[in-house]
Image (cartoon, rainbow, N blue to C red):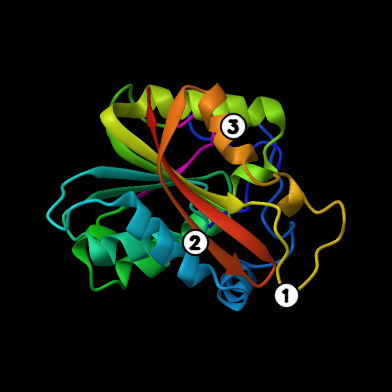
Amino acid sequence: MDDTTSQHAGHGHGHGHRSFLPALGEHRPPVFYDALGRLIGAPRMYAAVAEVADLDASSAATVVDVGCGTGALLRRVGRDLPGVRLVGVDPDERMLTTARRKAVRSRERAVRDARWERGYAQEVPAADGTCDLVLSSLMFHHLDPTGRAEMLAEVRRVLRPGGALVLADFDGTPGPVPLRRRSPMLAFGPGELQGLLAEAGFAVRAEKRLRLLVGGVVVLRAEVV
């Protein structure tokens, strides 16, 4: 889950030329970010992402998490799918440092072997057609409309034929803890994410909904059409 990439959450090549807002501000450490994720129920969302991704347990797929934060989602994927190649991308070097530290302690070889790269959603550091699965959890709502379009274009570029994007984000339905009216978590209303994916040339193939402490989340698996 990385909210870490506010208005400019992207990846890759010119990462020194983009600004970004860290997920929880400039001064809160990654440990605070992880604790908040557990509090709002992020582990259930990670399980839903892994379910919707629908990769075979023997898969050797290349899986890229755009806005990986401290790597919690990829650690979950690596636990379920030991043969995958994992790549985490985030603009915040503090998050990546924490992700690397947690990965080397993992029991799962796929997690220990993961690559952690600084980059942005609009500039994914991967060659054309080299990724089987791109993940994004609770990051997309931080992008402005231009950034969203650029990210989806980048996902199309890096996916192999038959590859998929699994996008998890807030769907505008309330949770037990009300949000302030202008919270970026309220960026999308019901069905809006599906519409943005369709405009970018994706077809939604699977959908799962769950409720976190701060709001409803929809998890979508989409393929290029």
- Between disc 1 and disc 2, the foreground one is 1
List the residue tagged with mark 3. Answer: 195
Residue drawn at (31%, 73%) of the image: 105
Extreme residue toward the right, this view: 181
Measured from the top left, where is residue 190 in percent x and y? 66, 46
Q: Name the residue carrying label 1.
A: 176
Secondary structure predominantly adopted by residues drawn in magenta: loop
Q: Secondary structure at mark 3?
A: helix
Q: CA distance from mark 2 to mark 3?
A: 29 Å
Q: Is residue 126 above or below residue 212?
A: above
The x, y position of residue 5, in whole percent, is 63, 45
Q: Amino acid at mark 2?
A: Thr
Q: Position of residue 134 (x, y in %)?
A: 39, 41
Relative to 55, 215 lies left or right: right
Residue 218 lies in magenta, yes or no? no
- Whether residue 122 is visible: no
Q: Is residue 115 left or right of residue 214?
A: left
Q: Earlier in the sequence, mark 1 or mark 2?
A: 2
